[in-house]
Image (cartoon, rainbow, N blue to C red):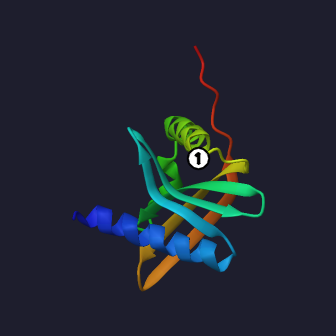
Amino acid sequence: MAKHNDTGTWGEQIVTDYLTAKGYAIRERQWRLNHLEIDIIATKDDEIAFVEVKTRSNADTDPLEAINRRKMAHMGAAATAYMQQFDIPLKPRFDVAAITGTPSDYHLRYIADAFFPPLKTY
């Protein structure tokens, strides 16, 4: 496995542990449907959180810069597909987690309800 994949998997585990400690139930990790993908899907109370995780070992780069309009639109499409496939009656929200550092020294920034996916324009 490539080093960047190891870093991403490590970051997703940090966020999974964080959410579990906050009382969330983890429904999925790395859920995929065709070209759509969501890093973590978690539920708590009447909400379902679709979480995008960005991990960087270099603290000089901001992981959140990688979340652009296109990524948000893909997450919206993936969330819609997931909710329809499993007939989910919960209120959706889109969260973002940014991790910088190494396993021995890292910083986690978690933003709940970080964005609303852009509407598709024709």
Most foreground residue, 29 or 113: 29
**Can you see residue 62?**
no
Element type at mark 1: loop
Q: Is residue 18 left or right of residue 103?
A: right
Above or below, 21 relative to 25: below
Which quarter of the image is occupied by the N terminus?
A: bottom left
Among the 4 quarters of the image, the one containing residue 45: bottom right
**Can you see residue 12?**
yes
Most foreground residue, 116 or 106: 116
Q: Is residue 60 left or right of residue 49?
A: left
Q: How many marks?
A: 1
Most foreground residue, 37 or 109: 37
The residue most toward the top is 122
Other residues around mark 1 within 10 Å, as few (<14) / some (14–19) / many (≥20): few
Above or below, 15 relative to 69: below
Give the image location of residue 119, x and y in percent.
64, 27
Most foreground residue, 82 or 97: 82
The amino acid sitting under disc 1 is Phe
Q: Is residue 106 left or right of residue 88?
A: left
Which residue does the image show at 55% across and 77% down from the upper left? 17
Among the 4 quarters of the image, the one containing residue 76: top right
Give the image location of residue 33, x and y in percent.
42, 42
The residue most toward the right is 46
Which quarter of the image is occupied by the C terminus?
A: top right
Above or below, 21 relative to 118: below
Give the image location of residue 53, x and y in percent.
50, 59
The residue most toward the bottom is 104
Give the image location of residue 58, x and y in percent.
39, 67
Among the 4 quarters of the image, the one containing residue 21: bottom right
Identify the residue position indicated by label 1 in the image: 86
